[in-house]
Image: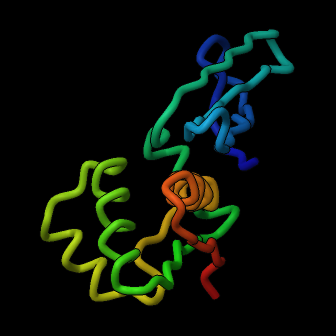
């Protein structure tokens, strides 16, 4: 969970928006919500896939950046890249870059994003690991 300072859209009072992201039922999901202590205005929103940039930036700032590590044999490397290309709608140029990084960290993002990619890989019988960047 992370927080974003903002102002209440109803009364202009300073508020804190709580934001989060996780893997739920095989999907990457995000949420945000606030309650204004001054006027009682409240709002909650949820979505699936990558969150709006402001939420992703807050999560990275408060939880750090995480890497997806893949350490596979040659046969599994091609399968892993095929799975990642399909779920992330990657271009071939991206896949070529990622292939050169294996074994090792192929991409990075929020912890939940990387956990979702590990989950996707595991469903295809491929091991991946999430590690926090130093």
Residue occupying the point 49% across, 55% down: 124
User: Which percent across, then down, holds residue 80?
Assistant: 39, 67
User: Looking at the picture, does residue 94 appear above or below residue 47?
Assistant: below
User: Seen from this angle, which residue lies furthest front?
Assistant: 75
* Left or right: 110 in relation to 19: left
* Left or right: 38 in relation to 132: right
Split into 4 quadrants, where in the image is the C terminus? bottom right
Residue occupying the point 23% across, 80% down: 97
Let me know if residue 3 appears in the view: yes
* Left or right: 13 in relation to 54: right
User: Which percent across, then down, holds residue 16?
Assistant: 74, 37
User: Which percent across, then down, holds residue 128?
Assistant: 56, 71
User: Looking at the picture, does residue 59 appear above or below residue 97?
Assistant: above
Coloured how? rainbow
Nearer the observer, 73 or 129: 73
User: Looking at the picture, does residue 116 appear above or below residue 77?
Assistant: above
* Left or right: 103 in relation to 68: left
Nearer the observer, 48 or 52: 48
User: Looking at the picture, does residue 87 appear above or below residue 111?
Assistant: above
Count of residue discs = 0
Quarter location, residue 7: top right
Residue occupying the point 71% across, 46% down: 3
Residue occupying the point 47% across, 88% down: 104
Nearer the observer, 77 or 129: 77
User: Which percent across, then down, holds residue 93?
Assistant: 13, 70
Nearer the observer, 13 or 134: 134
Let me know if residue 59 appears in the view: no
């Amino acid at each position: 969970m992370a927080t974003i300072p903002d102002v209440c859209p109803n009364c202009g009072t300073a508020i804190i928006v709580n934001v989060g992201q996780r893997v739920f039922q095989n999907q990457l999901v995000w949420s945000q919500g606030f309650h204004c202590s001054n006027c009682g205005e409240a709002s909650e929103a949820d979505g699936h896939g990558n969150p709006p940039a402001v939420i992703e930036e807050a999560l990275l700032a408060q939880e750090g950046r995480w890497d997806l590590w893949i350490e596979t044999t040659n046969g599994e490397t091609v399968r892993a890249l095929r799975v990642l290309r399909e779920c992330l709608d990657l271009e071939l140029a991206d896949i070529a870059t990622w292939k050169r990084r294996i074994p090792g960290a192929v991409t990075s993002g929020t912890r939940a994003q990387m956990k979702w990619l590990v989950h996707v890989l595991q469903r295809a019988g491929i091991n991946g690991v999430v590690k926090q960047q130093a």
